[in-house]
Image: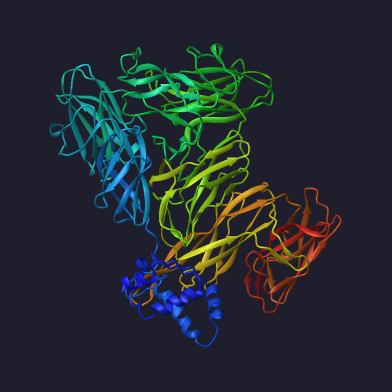
């Protein structure tokens, strides 16, 4: 049966009613049992709304048309558009969310191939793996096992992996490329006595498989060797909270560490005697699972921990001091420090896109680090690169001894200063000159450059006896719960009260008892020079990817991180989109930090996997690449998320329903005819939503809500009743709304047939959430503000006549005529109002409202007073206020 139907339908593009009827007549005698998923992959059927269904019957005419109508409906139903075909057969159902829980091993050696296995949910098997570095290729074994080939010229570092599944592209997981030989944990190693032997200068891939599991490894080392033992867990998206311990041959513990790079531990120790040494790995709270994977490196090669300065001027060569271990013959042992140092000349690249398919950044970055730009530096022979930040101005290195107001270091603004708070309680002082009214933005980077400082910055007068400002932790979480961007670094805006010199104090509010050269910071003192970054943030609370069905849409948030006084609009645009994919521009209006970005796929698009490339633009800044992000795992109180090397997407499956929005429908006016919509503070945004369903026999109600509304706009809820294919949802733009462009969308919640049969022989349904295309409105200056009298009646009886007081206050120099009527986007029903005109200086009055004897009871959605402003006899300006009037008996 399937072979016959596939042969009949292969290659057809069923776009017209006549073609549908022809297909129906051809197949009507053949259809018995059809698999929706098999046939739909070869057929492109348009959405058929209730309106289209009625038009279809009218176009079929009379006579033999009944046979054609029956045939057409049978073919639509039989082809499985959300319809049960036989007992237990399903039509449409929610697309599974493919989640990649882990990749094991989570890394490999450059110049070699590695066999990896994957595990996850929302998919049965995968056809391959995609790496953010395009040179890493994949061969498939059985849908769960793969061979990754890593060319020798792939740089060491962190990359992203996605699984390509029948449900689309999966969520992302980390993959590390290094220079050391690799092996996987292979034997029982639960005690020091059963420690698994591993070689020096190697990486062991292991996992804490169950609660209470403890892994042990043994290696042979010689006296005088410096061995660096490091565990990657958090940095490879593992839930493991690793603890490292090192023991000598007698079982004496030599060192322990619970977190060096974030919560990932590292131990550097000098081997005291020739012999066998053992490493213990376990979870801090003794949890465990198949996802608790880790990479343990035991290395005598170079390892750079940090640099001073931690950043360099872009597109220049800089002298930078590296701190670490085993840094070679030219290195020096810093007195009183456990670190070696070596100075190197590093050529910093120019500013550019932080993400590139051909050259991804080999780092795992947190949401808070979106505001830092940097590049990878690979020290010769090192397993792991370090990230060095970029500055657009020359870098100033803090002088030794600037620890008092009298020895404050003079810096010129704009300034980017590299400093160290080596001693516990150390204070660094700087001096700036300022003019009265001059605006400065001060920011200290610590946590965001991987430094164990919690910085605070203070501004004092020239004699240091009066504090003018103090800035500490930046707890404002612009990214929200799915992209937690709050951090412990200090930042703030300060206005100089008078001409003169001022002192800037930098300190850390936390620290241990000993000296630590790792306590570095970056002090930025800039004038009000606006800047921004933009991230794409998923709208789900769990790991996900951008999988879009044909004929459907997917939505994400774009989140703007505004800096140094940027308040203007930011425009986000897509470029180089694959065929069949549409992604309209998004506008984040003045002061808006978040807006919805909608990606739509045409019904005829081919299945594909690709990348969504976005840029953000601001008039006073320029263009910047938009950064991708992912939720690694759910968490309490916030999720665990990070930046990604790209925004991957796939086209997979078919959508059973689609909703489309239009906020620019003309308004019918009794006096002025069809009016083009003009949005301004104090007006309503009316969004017409149209529903298109593939299943014409299931016309469930749809509940509409706004998505991505600016904070000033109150969200609303509106229904599209069952059996109807269009409806409205409206939003009020308050008089305080700043002028500018804004992008919003509408969310719809409804049901579709799930395909299964209940005990009564009825088809079950499932609830789905879907989204419209984005709607962009251009908010212009208002000419007047319409307000209902606070004592205006809220109820009207059938047959009653009311006098309702209101005002229309002219603003922004408007002096012309205004005319007010009752209005609702889908027509006023059961009541009528006598239009009122204001001329001259009149700005308040009364409108008479009459309720019909058979007026429908209840409130009419989005009923309002609608005022039109006339300029040279043309209706130009518009204003509204909602009228919550309930019709009662």
Pinpoint residue 276: horizontal percent, then vertical percent: 15, 24
User: Residue placed farthest to the left in the image?
Assistant: 193
Pinpoint residue 83: horizontal percent, then vertical percent: 40, 72
Pinpoint residue 315: horizontal percent, then vertical percent: 50, 25
Q: Is residue 445 visible?
A: no
Q: Nearer the viewer, residue 145 or 884?
A: 145
Q: In the image, 322: left or right of 870?
A: left
- Which residue: 39% across, 22% down? 518
Which quadrant does the N terminus fall into? bottom left
- Which residue: 28% across, 40% down? 149
- Which residue: 29% across, 56% down? 124
Q: Is residue 38 above or below residue 287?
A: below
Q: Is residue 362 above or below residue 793?
A: above
Q: In the image, 18: left or right of 159?
A: right
Q: Nearer the viewer, residue 551 or 873?
A: 551
Say which quarter of the image contains residue 310: top left
Q: Nearer the viewer, residue 803 or 194?
A: 194
Q: In the image, 696: left or right of 169?
A: right
Q: Nearer the viewer, residue 545 or 360?
A: 360
Colour logic: rainbow
User: Residue placed farthest to the bottom in the image?
Assistant: 63
């Amino acid at each position: 049966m399937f072979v016959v139907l596939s042969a009949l339908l292969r290659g057809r593009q069923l776009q017209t009613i006549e073609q549908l009827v022809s297909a129906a007549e051809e197949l009507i005698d053949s259809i018995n049992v059809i698999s929706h998923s098999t046939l739909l992959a070869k057929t492109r059927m348009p959405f058929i709304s209730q309106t289209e269904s009625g038009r279809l019957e009218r176009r079929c005419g009379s006579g033999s048309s009944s046979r054609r109508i029956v045939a057409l409906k049978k073919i639509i139903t039989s082809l499985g558009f959300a319809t049960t075909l036989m007992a237990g057969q399903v039509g449409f159902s929610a697309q599974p969310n493919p989640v990649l829980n882990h990749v094991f091993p989570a890394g490999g050696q450059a110049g070699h191939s590695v066999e990896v296995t994957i595990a996850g949910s929302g998919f049965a098997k995968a056809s391959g793996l995609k790496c953010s570095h395009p040179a890493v290729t994949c061969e498939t074994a059985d849908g769960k096992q793969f061979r990754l080939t890593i060319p020798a010229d792939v740089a060491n570092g962190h990359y992203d992996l996605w699984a390509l599944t029948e449900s689309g592209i999966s969520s992302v997981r980390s993959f590390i490329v290094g220079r050391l030989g690799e092996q996987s944990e292979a034997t029982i190693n639960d005690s020091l006595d059963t420690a698994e032997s591993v070689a020096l200068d190697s990486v062991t891939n292991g996992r804490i498989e169950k609660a209470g599991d403890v892994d042990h490894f043994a290696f042979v080392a010689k006296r005088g060797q410096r061995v660096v033992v490091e565990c990657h867990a958090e940095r490879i998206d593992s839930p493991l909270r690793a603890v490292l311990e090192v023991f000598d041959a007698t079982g004496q513990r030599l060192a322990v560490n619970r977190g060096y790079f974030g919560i990932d531990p590292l131990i550097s120790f000098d081997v005291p005697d020739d012999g066998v040494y053992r490493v213990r790995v376990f979870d801090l709270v003794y949890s465990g699972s198949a996802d608790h994977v880790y990479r343990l490196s035991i290395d005598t090669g170079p390892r750079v921990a940090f640099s001073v300065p931690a950043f360099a001027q872009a597109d220049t060569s800089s002298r930078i001091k590296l701190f670490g271990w085993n840094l070679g013959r030219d290195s020096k042992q810093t007195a009183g420090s456990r670190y070696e140092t070596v100075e190197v000349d590093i050529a910093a690249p120019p500013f550019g896109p932080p993400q590139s398919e051909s050259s991804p950044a080999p780092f795992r970055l947190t949401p808070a680090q979106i505001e830092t730009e940097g590049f990878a530096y690979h020290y010769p022979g090192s397993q792991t690169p370090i990230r060095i930040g970029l500055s657009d101005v020359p870098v100033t290195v803090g002088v030794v001894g600037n620890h008092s107001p009298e020895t404050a270091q003079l810096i010129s603004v704009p300034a980017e200063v590299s400093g160290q708070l080596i001693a516990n309680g150390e204070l660094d002082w700087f001096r700036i000159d300022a003019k009265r009214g001059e605006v400065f933005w001060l920011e200290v980077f610590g946590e965001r450059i991987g430094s164990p400082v919690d910085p605070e910055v203070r501004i004092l007068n020239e004699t240091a006896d009066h504090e003018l400002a103090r800035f500490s932790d930046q707890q404002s979480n612009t990214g929200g719960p799915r992209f937690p961007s709050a951090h412990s670094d200090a930042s703030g805006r300060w206005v100089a009260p008078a001409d003169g010199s001022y002192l800037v104090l930098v300190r850390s509010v936390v620290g241990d008892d000993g000296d630590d050269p790792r306590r570095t910071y970056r002090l930025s003192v800039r004038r009000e020079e606006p800047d921004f970054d933009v991230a794409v943030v998923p709208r789900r609370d769990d790991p996900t990817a951008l999988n879009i069905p044909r004929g459907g849409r997917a939505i994400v948030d774009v989140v703007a991180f505004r800096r140094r006084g940027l308040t203007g609009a930011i425009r986000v645009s897509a470029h180089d989109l694959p065929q069949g994919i549409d992604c309209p521009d998004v506008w984040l209006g003045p002061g808006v930090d978040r807006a919805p970005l909608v990606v739509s796929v045409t019904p005829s698009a081919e299945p594909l996997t690709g990348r969504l490339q976005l840029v953000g633009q601001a008039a006073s800044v320029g263009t910047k690449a938009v950064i991708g992000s992912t939720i690694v795992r759910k968490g309490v109180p916030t999720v665990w998320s990070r930046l990604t090397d790209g925004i991957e997407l796939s086209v997979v499956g078919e959508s059973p329903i689609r909703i489309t929005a239009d906020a620019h429908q003309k308004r019918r006016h009794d006096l002025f005819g069809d009016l083009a919509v003009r949005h301004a503070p104090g007006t309503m945004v009316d969004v017409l939503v149209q529903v298109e369903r593939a299943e014409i026999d299931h016309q469930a109600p749809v509940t509409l809500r706004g998505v991505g509304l600016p904070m000033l706009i109150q969200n609303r809820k509106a229904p599209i009743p069952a059996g109807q294919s269009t409806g409205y949802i409206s939003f009020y733009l308050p008089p305080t709304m700043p002028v500018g462009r804004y992008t919003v969308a509408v969310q719809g919640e409804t049901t579709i047939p799930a395909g299964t049969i209940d005990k009564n022989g009825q088809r079950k349904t499932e609830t789905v959430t879907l989204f419209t295309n984005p709607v962009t409105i251009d908010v212009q200056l208002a000419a007047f503000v319409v307000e209902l009298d606070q004592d205006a009646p809220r109820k009207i009886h059938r047959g009653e006549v009311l006098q309702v007081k209101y005002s229309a206050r002219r603003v922004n120099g408007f002096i012309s005529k205004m005319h007010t009527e009752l209005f609702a986007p889908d027509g006023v029903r059961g009541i009528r109002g006598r239009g009122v005109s204001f001329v001259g200086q009149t700005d308040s009055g009364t409108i008479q409202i009459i309720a019909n004897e058979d007026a429908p009871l209840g409130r009419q959605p989005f009923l309002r007073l609608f005022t039109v402003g006339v300029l040279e006899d043309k209706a130009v300006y518009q204003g509204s206020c909602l009228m919550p009037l309930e019709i009662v008996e």
